[in-house]
Image (cartoon, grey):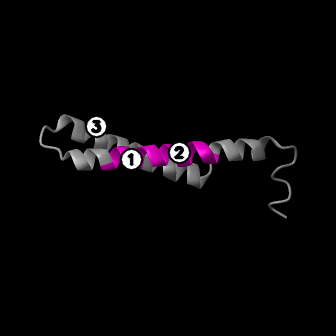
């Protein structure tokens, strides 16, 4: 099960990774842009991992979602 947050962060992460791959192939790419995108990817990966760690505890708790929809 994935949330909209997980989906959107994953999508953004894939877009940034594709952009980094493009820049890696371009010999005229700006080193500062490559560094900037690398930092963005690192931040997005941290957001994604932290969210999943927190949600795994919540999702595994017995009855963790039962009170949310009432």
Position above or below: 40 against 26 = below
Q: Of the two numbered discs 1 and 3 on the same chain, state the one appearing first in sequence.
A: 3
The quadrant holding residue 52 is top right
Rendered-image quadrant of the N terminus: top right
Within the image, what quadrant is residue 14 found in?
A: top left
Mark 3: few/some/many CA within 10 Å (<14, 14-19, 20+): few
**Residue 40: image x %, image y %?**
40, 49
Front-lying residue, 1 or 36: 36
User: Residue shown at 81%/52% (left/top)?
Assistant: 65
Q: Is residue 28 above or below residue 66?
A: above
Query: Relative to 31, is 2 on the left or the right?
Result: right
Dot 1 falls on a residue whose secondary structure is: helix
The residue labelled by disc 3 is 21
Seen at 16% across and 39% down, the residue is 26
**Inter-mark Cα distance, 2 to 1:** 11 Å
Q: Is residue 29 left or right of residue 64?
A: left
**Foreground residue among 62 and 36:** 36
Q: How many marks?
A: 3
Residue 2 position within the rendered picture, expressed as x and y whole percent measured from the top left: 62, 46
Give the residue pinned by disc 2.
Answer: 46
Q: Is residue 3 left or right of residue 38?
A: right
Kindly identify which residue carries mark 1. Answer: 39
Foreground pick, 44 / 59? 44
Neighbor class of circle 2 (other Cα within 10 Å; few <14, some 14-19, many 20+) is: few
What are the residue bounds of the magenta stretch?
36-51
Q: Quadrant of the C terminus?
A: bottom right
Q: Which mark is residue 64?
A: none
Magenta stretch, main secondary structure, is: helix
Name the spot of residue 19 as percent of width and height, x first: 29, 45
Residue at coordinates 49% horizontally, 43% vertically from top-left? 45
For label 3, the SS is helix
């Amino acid at each position: 099960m994935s949330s909209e947050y997980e989906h959107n962060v994953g999508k953004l992460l894939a877009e940034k990774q594709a952009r980094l791959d493009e820049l890696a192939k371009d010999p005229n790419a700006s080193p500062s842009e490559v560094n900037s995108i690398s930092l963005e990817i690192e931040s997005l990966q941290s957001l994604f991992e932290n969210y999943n760690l927190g949600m795994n505890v919540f999702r595994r708790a017995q009855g963790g979602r039962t009170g949310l929809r009432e």
